[in-house]
Amino acid sequence: MEKLTREMAEREEAANMIDALHDGSFELTGEFLTKYAGDAVGALLLAVKPRDRAYVLSSTIDEGRAYFPGGIAELPADGFWLPSGEIEVQFEGEASDCFADVDDWTIHSDLAYLYTGYGLVVPVDLAVLSANVSAILSDSKKAVQETRVSHLLGVKVD
């Protein structure tokens, strides 16, 4: 059995957190974005409705570039934080049989905790995010215009 390393645990946790972001488990409210998003990412995401924010982010994140800084790090304008203080892993047997470096972990019974600092820093491709936001705003504007026209004409536009 391969022993779990800090890097393996962080990669898996990063993937899980990014999946949670894509499926809407993180509420990307204005308050969240103000607190955790870099300036450029926050400005773009605040331009769209909250229900569309996870969607416009979905193709902009490269999981391989996300990282846990382990402490306070400067938030890049093209990224955001996903808050998380630790990774929890349940294990069976001796910790030394399960973890490559037991000193990286805080062990309590059959649970191990890995400190991650303030959370995951997630870089975003701003060009793709900008294009996604523009497309959503264009679609919304078009839908509003079609609704106005159909209301004025008394006809439903599909």
Image (tube, grey):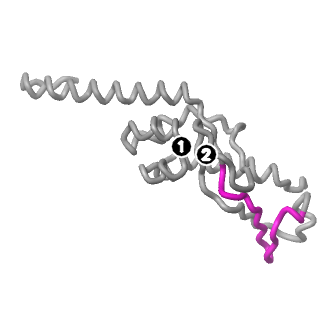
Figure quadrant of the N terminus: bottom right
Residue visible at 46% across and 49% down in the picture:
28
Question: Percent position (x, y) of residue 143?
Answer: 26, 28
Residue visible at 75% across and 62% down in the picture:
115
User: Can you say whether 81 is above or below 49 in the image?
Assistant: below
Q: Which disc, if any, is residue 102?
A: none
Q: Which disc, if any, is residue 22?
A: 1
Q: Which disc, if any, is residue 18?
A: 2
Question: Percent position (x, y) of residue 58?
Answer: 53, 36
Is residue 145 found left or right of 75 in the rendered image? left
User: Can you say whether 56 is above or below 24 in the image?
Assistant: above
Real-space Cα separation, disc 2 to disc 1, in angstroms:
6 Å
Q: Secondary structure at mark 2?
A: helix
Asked if the magenta segment contains residue 106, the reply would be: yes
- Residue type at mark 2: give it: Ile
Asked if the magenta segment contains residue 46, the reply would be: no
